[in-house]
Image: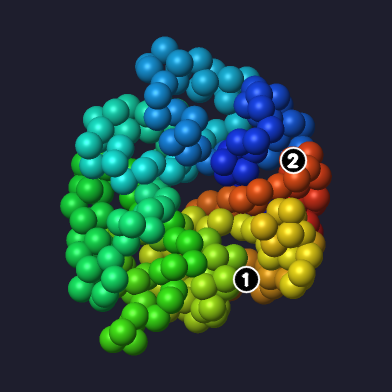
Amino acid sequence: MTTLGFQLYSARNFPPLSEILKKLSKAGYREVEGYGGIYATMDDAALTQFRAELDANGLTMPTGHFGIDMLEKETDRALAVARILGIEAVYCPYLLPDQRPSDAAGWFAFGQRLQAASKPFRDAGLTFGWHNHDFEFHTLADGSTPQEQILAGGPELSWEADIAWIIRGGADPFAWIESYGKRITAVHVKDIAPSGQNANEDGWADLGHGTVEWQKLIAALKNTSVKHFVLEHDNPSDIDRLMERSIASFNAY
């Protein structure tokens, strides 16, 4: 049976993390996804303690987000974090607006940059990929999209497909799944509220309580290389509700 993980970024506004881990375990989650805000400043001792806390709650961290600066400039540290926490797949999650290229050639070059950054991680036996937002699906002057160019420039990159951001970018997720399914190794699972609703949550919704066709999408994704489904909500107002309602919806699909 496919299981649902939880991106810990979703709970950043609901400390302490130790309580979040207990709640996730109680709600039935067995996997979590890390992000730099948790472990970027941890030394080995703190990482080891954090790993013990995950273990005590029956949780693993098979995937993690690492910022481009850490991946390129603190490669050994990022590898150490992955090793201690048991991370098997590393995803670069974002590029700040002032760092984004403006044309197809620039995005292709960024894909090449990620490809170069990936080598030490792939040499260590880890999956390495890119996680999208919406801007990668905005059409460029030549008719292509940044996402196409990134994946072309980095032919060995995996893709953690954030389906709701694909939709917000104006693209058809089913078409992207069909075209790039072999590159998709993880998926962010989140929902979009009906128009005009959940303004206090930036228009996102708990899984199964929005407009995204997740039942059909999960069926389509089962024909891809996806190994991990990871729940994310960028700005939940009630973390307990998010955890409980979302895993109930996922388990019903």
Q: Earlier in the sequence, mark 2 or mark 1?
A: 1
Instruction: Decide which of 217, 67 is in the foreground and name it.
Output: 67
In terms of image quadrants, where is residue 108? Answer: bottom left
The residue beneath circle 1 is: 217
Q: Position of residue 187 (x, y in %)?
A: 53, 58
Q: What residue sits 43% from the left and 76% below the top?
A: 138
Q: Which mark is residue 239?
A: 2
- Compared with 110, 45 (above or below) is above
Q: What residue sits 56% from the left and 56% below the top?
A: 188
Q: What residue sits 18% from the left and 52% below the top?
A: 116
Q: How far apart are marks 2 and 1 (CA)?
A: 24 Å
Q: Can residue 160 be seen in this view?
A: yes
Q: What element carries label 1?
A: helix
Depth check, mark 2 against mark 1: the one in front is 2
What's the amino acid at mark 1?
Leu
Q: Where is residue 190 in the image (x, y as percent from the top left)?
A: 64, 58
Q: What element carries label 2?
A: helix
